[in-house]
Image (cartoon, grey):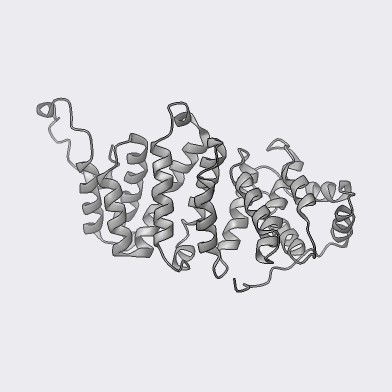
Amino acid sequence: MAPGPAQEGLRNEALQAALTAALAGKTAQLEDLLSRHGGYGLRPNLRLAAAFGAEVSALPGTVARLLDRLGANDAAPDQPQVFLPVAAAHGWVGRLRAGREIGTAWDALALLAGDERTPVRVGTLDALTSFAARPGGPDALVARATEWLEIEDREISFGAAGVVVEVFGNRQTLAALSNPEPLLDYLSHAIEAVVGASRAAERSDARRRLLLALPQTLSAAVIAFGPRGASWLEEVCQNARHPDLRTALSGAILALGDKASGQGAALAQRLRGALEGSAKPPRDPTRRRPGAGRGKSSRPMR
């Protein structure tokens, strides 16, 4: 993979010294400094996390022991120590950029992306988005994300998929793919996982987050991939039966029908027709309320 723009490492001398000590097994000072400067709640200090990742990327040898320790911290979302897994996510992406500890890094990132805590997911999303901005990054992420769908823990699998789907909601990231087919295959498999979930799994917060991430990425894929993306989404609509999936598809179609998408009304109408055609027939079609079809092009479909 060709190198992308260099990310600046740590400037703070105390943090640099603490990192050196942590690599020798004395992690307390590094953990304290990262926690104090890492921000809280929904707004972790992503600049610090990225600088930490850049610093870690340049280190020789292995740093898995340190990153595993940071990533394993189970602090509550409103505690300062929740920043440690955020730093770990950027550290692992730094190792990927440097071509070091690749398999270990991807395995760790799957767990961090599937974390139930919002700050950790936000930090991991930022780290993976930065990775996908590099040449070859989007293709590598799709390949690994497909493997993550096979993780037995459904919360982690759905959670990681939700983060990956969010990464590809960015049109620039989509445009950087060498071939759209692997991503479309990935999205198909993610949709299959959502639809095939057990009744208990349907109550999963991670599954819900994945469903919420789908509309933006589906519409972005149609815009980025042109006729190929449109035909793929039309086929998905034609076979959609599950109400949760239909809600997500409806959101994507509404986004494509908006003038800001630049796609024109004809495409949205075509997709709407495909989705309406796969709906369950009403129990008694003769009881259709007069005027029920008015304004349907601008409202969600069931």
Residue at the spot 55% in from the left edge and 41% down from the top edge: 151
46 and 163: which is toward the camera: 163
Residue 145 x %, y %: 52, 52
The image shows residue 280 at horizontal and vertical percentages of: 22, 33
Quarter of the image holding residue 52?
Answer: bottom right
The residue lying toward the viewer, choosing from 226 and 140, is: 140
Give me the residue at 40% from left, 58% from top: 220
Q: On the image, which quarter does residue 94 sit in?
A: bottom right
Q: Quadrant of the N terminus?
A: bottom right
Q: Is residue 211 left or right of residue 23?
A: left
Q: Position of residue 174 (x, y in %)?
A: 45, 63
Percent position (x, y) of residue 129? 57, 59
In this view, which residue lies farthest toward the left?
Answer: 286
Q: Is residue 140 above or below residue 235?
A: below
Is 270 drawn above or below residue 116 in the view shown?
A: below
| Residue at image coords 63%, 56% | 127
The C terminus, quarter of image: top left
